[in-house]
Image (spheres, rainbow, N blue to C red):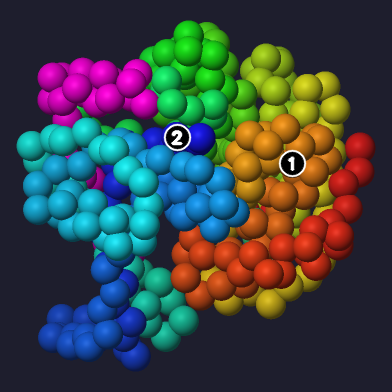
C-alpha cells in the first residue's frame, strides 16, 4: 500500500463567476466545495489506477470533519491526525478565463499536535511500502520537518517521494537520508541552486549538480513539453503528444501519482516515466482535478518517447 501525506489540506472552494465586479456584491449559484490539497490529488489518481492507498496528515475543527466526510463519500481510505485549530479554506474565483485565488495560511500547529501526528505516521508506515509527501508545511512546523519524515520512513525501509517547494524543498535536500524521488519544476530548481535557468542546456546541467547525487529520481515536468528526468546518472528527455487540455490544475500531482504507481509496481525506469506522463496528461484532459479517464491510458502510453540525452 502507498501512504500519501498532506500536512496542510484545505477545503477547495470554486466560485465560477461570469465577471468579478470589484467593490460590489458578487452572487454565485453553483459553488463547489471539495477536499483539497496536493496529496489528496495524488491519492485520487492512485485510487483510479487501482493502487491501494491511504491518506494522512493533519485536520482540525468542523472544516476538518468536512474533509473527512468528503473523503468517505469518495471511498478514500484515510487516517488524519486531529488538531485543535480549523483546517483552512482555499478559494478559486473563476472569472472571464482568469483564476483569482484566495488562500488561507491555515492553522498553527502546536508541538504536542505534531508529536501526535508523528505517532500516527510511524504506525501507518508499518502498513505501506512507499510514502508520498506533497505540498507546504503548516505554520508552527520547522522547514526541515520533511527530513524527519524521510528519516523515519528510511528507518522503516520505506522509500519517500517528495513534492514541495521553496525553503522546505531546500532543507529536505540538505537532510540525510535523501528522498527517493523529487519533482521540482524549473523555478524550484533555480531556487535551490541559487541561479536562474534559462535554457534546456541550463536545466540539463542543473540536474548534474551534486545536490542531486544521492537522489535516485529527479523529475522536472515541463507541461506540454513533457519532462526532463535524471535517474541515477542518466538524463532523459521525455516527449509527449499534443493533447486537448481542459484543466491542467493538478497535473503535477497526477504525474507524481503515476511515477509512484510505477515504482510501487516495480516497473522498468522507462515505464515509470511513461506512466507519470500519461497520468499527468489524463488529468489535464479532465475538467475535475485529480480525475483521469483510465480507458485512454494505453493509447497515450504508446505515444510517449523517452530518450537518453
Ligand atoms: P505542474 O502541475 O506541477 O506544474 P506540469 O504542468 O509540468 O506540472 O504537468 C505535469 C505533466 O502533466 C506534464 O509532464 C505532462 O505530462 C502533463 N501536462 C500538463 N500540462 C500539459 C499540457 N498543456 N499538454 C500536455 N500535457 C500536459
Provide residue 139's location: percent of width, then percent of height: 22, 33
Q: Is mark 1 within 8 Å of ligand 1?
A: no
Q: Is residue 298 visible?
A: yes
Question: What residue is at 16 percent from the left and 25 percent from the top?
Answer: 113
Label 1 residue SS: helix
Question: Residue 3: percent from the left, percent from the top?
Answer: 45, 34
Q: Residue at x 49, y 60 (%)?
A: 290
Q: Nearer the viewer, residue 129 or 211?
A: 129
Badge 2 or badge 1: first in the primary sequence: 2
Q: Quadrant of residue 187?
A: top right
Q: How many marks?
A: 2
Extent of the magenta region: 101-124
* Relative horizontal placement of residue 217, taking residue 240 as reference (left or right): left
Looking at this view, is 92 or 123 the one in front? Answer: 123
- Can residue 284 be seen? no
Q: Which quarter of the rendered image does ligand 1 occupy?
A: bottom right
Q: Is residue 120 magenta?
A: yes
Residue indicated by mark 1: 272
The quarter of the rendered structure image containing the C terminus is top right
Q: Is residue 4 left or right of residue 117?
A: right
Tell me if residue 178 comes above or below residue 269 in the rendering: above
Q: Is residue 150 magenta?
A: no
Give the image location of residue 306, x and y in percent.
87, 47
Q: Residues within 10 Å of mark 1 (few under 14, many from 20)?
A: some
User: Disc 2 marks which residue?
Assistant: 3
Q: CA distance from mark 2 to mark 1?
A: 18 Å
Q: Residue at x 22, y 88 (%)?
A: 29
Amino acid at each position: 500500500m502507498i501512504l500519501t501525506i498532506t500536512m496542510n489540506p484545505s477545503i477547495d472552494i470554486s466560485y465560477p463567476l461570469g465577471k468579478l465586479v470589484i467593490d460590489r456584491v458578487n452572487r454565485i449559484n453553483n459553488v463547489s466545495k471539495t477536499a483539497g490539497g496536493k496529496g489528496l490529488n495524488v491519492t485520487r489518481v492512485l485510487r483510479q489506477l487501482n493502487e491501494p492507498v491511504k491518506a494522512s496528515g493533519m485536520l482540525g475543527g468542523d472544516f476538518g470533519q468536512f474533509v473527512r466526510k468528503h473523503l468517505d463519500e469518495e471511498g478514500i481510505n484515510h487516517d488524519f491526525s486531529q488538531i485543535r485549530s480549523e483546517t483552512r479554506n482555499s478559494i478559486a474565483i473563476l472569472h472571464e478565463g482568469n483564476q483569482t485565488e484566495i488562500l488561507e495560511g491555515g492553522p498553527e500547529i502546536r508541538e504536542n499536535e505534531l508529536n501526535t501526528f508523528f505517532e500516527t505516521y510511524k504506525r501507518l508506515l508499518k502498513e505501506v511500502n512507499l510514502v508520498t509527501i506533497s505540498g507546504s508545511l503548516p505554520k508552527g512546523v520547522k522547514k526541515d520537518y520533511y527530513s524527519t519524515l524521510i528519516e523515519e520512513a528510511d528507518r522503516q525501509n520505506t522509500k519517500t517521494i517528495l513534492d514541495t517547494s521553496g525553503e522546505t524543498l531546500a532543507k529536505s535536500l540538505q537532510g540525510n537520508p535523501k528522498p527517493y524521488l523529487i519533482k521540482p519544476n524549473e523555478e524550484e530548481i533555480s531556487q535551490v541552486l541559487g541561479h536562474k535557468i534559462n535554457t534546456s542546456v541550463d536545466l540539463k546541467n542543473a540536474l548534474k549538480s551534486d545536490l542531486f547525487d544521492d537522489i535516485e529520481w529527479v523529475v522536472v515536468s515541463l507541461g506540454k513539453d513533457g519532462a526532463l528526468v535524471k535517474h541515477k546518472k542518466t538524463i532523459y528527455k521525455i516527449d509527449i503528444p499534443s493533447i486537448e487540455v481542459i484543466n491542467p490544475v493538478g497535473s503535477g500531482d497526477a504525474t507524481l501519482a503515476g511515477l509512484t504507481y510505477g515504482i510501487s509496481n516495480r516497473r522498468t525506469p522507462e515505464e515509470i516515466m511513461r506512466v507519470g506522463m500519461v497520468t499527468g496528461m489524463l488529468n489535464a484532459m479532465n475538467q475535475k482535478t485529480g480525475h483521469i479517464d483510465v480507458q485512454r491510458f494505453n493509447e497515450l502510453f504508446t505515444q510517449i518517447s523517452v530518450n537518453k540525452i
